[in-house]
Amino acid sequence: MPDTEHLTLEQIHALARACLMDNGCDQANADAVASTVTHAERDGSVSHGLFRIPGYVAALRSGKVDGAAAPRTERLSPALIRVDGGGGFAPRALQHGIPLVAQAAEQCGVAALALVRVHHFAALWHETEALAARGLAALACTAYMPAVAPAGARRALFGTNPVSFAWPRPDDTPVVFDMATASMAMGEVQIAARDGHQVPPGTGLNAAGEATTDPASIADGGVLLPFGGYKGSVISMMIELLAAALIGERFSFEAAEADNQDGGPPRGGEFILALSPQRMAGDDWAGHAAGLFERLGQLDGARLPGQRRHTRRHDRGARAVNAALVEKIRGLCK
Amino acid sequence: MPDTEHLTLEQIHALARACLMDNGCDQANADAVASTVTHAERDGSVSHGLFRIPGYVAALRSGKVDGAAAPRTERLSPALIRVDGGGGFAPRALQHGIPLVAQAAEQCGVAALALVRVHHFAALWHETEALAARGLAALACTAYMPAVAPAGARRALFGTNPVSFAWPRPDDTPVVFDMATASMAMGEVQIAARDGHQVPPGTGLNAAGEATTDPASIADGGVLLPFGGYKGSVISMMIELLAAALIGERFSFEAAEADNQDGGPPRGGEFILALSPQRMAGDDWAGHAAGLFERLGQLDGARLPGQRRHTRRHDRGARAVNAALVEKIRGLCK
């Protein structure tokens, strides 16, 4: 195990915020990103926590990302919101877009949020859970940079292309999943490489196009495979189409071609769908859904997605953070 | 190979239509179902073609399905259409719902169709391709009866829960996938059993909860597994929530509990989403998407989903149909 340092959630937020402001973020952008990072550490989602700060900082220092971006919102129809992130980090643009798409979904039953000109470097459950907290089911997806070979191929075209879905439960945390359509998220592969672990067969190919269980050889010039073979591959393709072609943003391969390779997130888009069970199913929707979750809970070996993360959330104590990472982040502050 | 009989597409349609009308369908319902069956045979999607007629007939004969159902449509918001199928087969209800949800998506950019009180026994690409033909991206999903064990469990809770997505291409067939979130559709498992083939490892468990490659022992009291392990399992769960909880219809387990076990499709719902790239991305959307498909086509081993089926479609000649099946269907006519 690597050395760890214990930080409270307040300390994690303050460290992230200070580091971002020291590197060009205004207060509003720094707060938005620091909250996202802190929520990830709180939930034990460490590959999207402080681990991301060096990448955020690299993108600010290179000038690729505008740390003082002011998102612009447009309501294109009663059910369609577009937020132009102005080349900033996604959490700031989401602060504008989520309340508007929630309101649209409450009115129309279904609504979409097209997030463009943003740099997304976080988990997607932040946004789907924010919608679920308002009683809405939500789907979110984004592309990234080519890291996944389509089924049958040996060269990367798709991003790790995560997708998150959340189902609201009144007076409880939502049922939510958030997963790469790669066999594994590249962040997890990087952490496995850092910590000296192997990855399962089927995770990816090395630079020569051969199957391997060594995460370092996948991360270093190799390629991830989609989860579930051909079926996972077409879902990854669908995410390229929703998060890029549908909303007029860049495919993973276009994002990589336009990127300055500073190690931070490329410019891209995010597609978010909000759905109102209240509008479609009526008053009984929550009790009805609870019946499915109850059946699932009765099966030996099955589990409700998201619950392990939410259990960690209830612990308000300090978190053990990789000490070398904390040192690195401190070194990135003024 | 089993004996086959060659039927033209017109003969396939006439056989299906006559058999349905002889068993209680009115002309409109018989035409809608016969067209769906014929399109499946045309495309080589035989597990959803004439193979389904005995099940359709069983549901008419038992009185479970109303062969003269008249769907009722409601526009719940500018972006939300509900069609109550009146306890009939889904193809008739879709004839009402698809034009309305297409119009709503053209106006709003995003629209949803909630199909309730229908009996769905067909592929989903019929409806997603119908929307793609109008320049819309489309997603459709439906639940069925428990046949799939959630990841980690040994007992069925989820249906085979298919999902289809279609992306429109002007002057060309759409890019479209339609797949069970089971490792394999039960229709395919049944056909493999009928034809004496084995299925791949990971397809399912036998009645004792053990892995097997014998399709008959999966179909006979066993259980399918989700594709892609845990990740495929949560997608199957999402489909239960979209096609049942969201729109106020039955989960797979509820559909099975209410079903009369006549071998025909249970009552359930379908969720359909229509999205306008024109409204979201503007005039350049089709050329932009073509760039992704071109890259995909350049990768050795990769392929565009749906194209093999569309290639078969261009053959307007007779189709070789299992002769015993044709005989069985003729025996179901008056």
Image: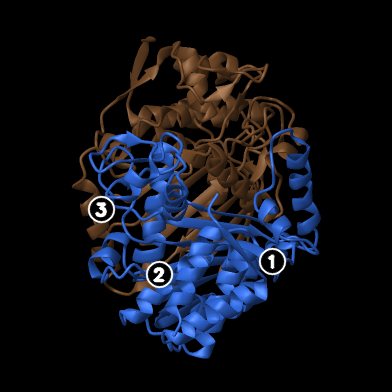
Chain colours: A brown, B blue
- Comparing labels 3 and 1, the label whose residue is closer to the camera: 1
Disc 2 or 1, which lies upstream in sequence? 2
Residue nearer the viewer, A52 or B16: B16
Quarter where residue B274 is shown: bottom right
Mark on residue B318? 1
- Label 2: few (<14), some (14–19) or many (≥20) C-alpha neighbours in 10 Å: some
Indicate the amino acid at tag 1.
Ala
Identify the residue at the far left of this view.
Answer: A298
Q: Secondary structure beneath disc 2?
A: helix
Q: Quadrant of residue A136?
A: bottom left
The residue tagged 2 is: B55
Q: Is the residue marked by circle 1 packed among few (<14), some (14-19), or many (20+) residues within 10 Å? A: some
Say which of A320 and B69 sits in front: B69
Residue A57 in sight from this viewpoint: yes
Q: Residue A11, relative to residue A266: is it above or below? A: above
* Chain that bears disc 3: A
Q: Which mark is residue B143?
A: none
Residue sitting nearer the eye, B292 or A85 = B292
* Left or right of B319 in this view: A284: left
Q: Residue at x 73, y 61 (%)?
A: B173
Distance from label 3 to label 1 (Cα)?
Answer: 48 Å
Judging depth in this view, the residue of B12 and B40 nearest the camera is B12
Q: Where does residue A190 sit, x and y in percent of width and height? A: 52, 20
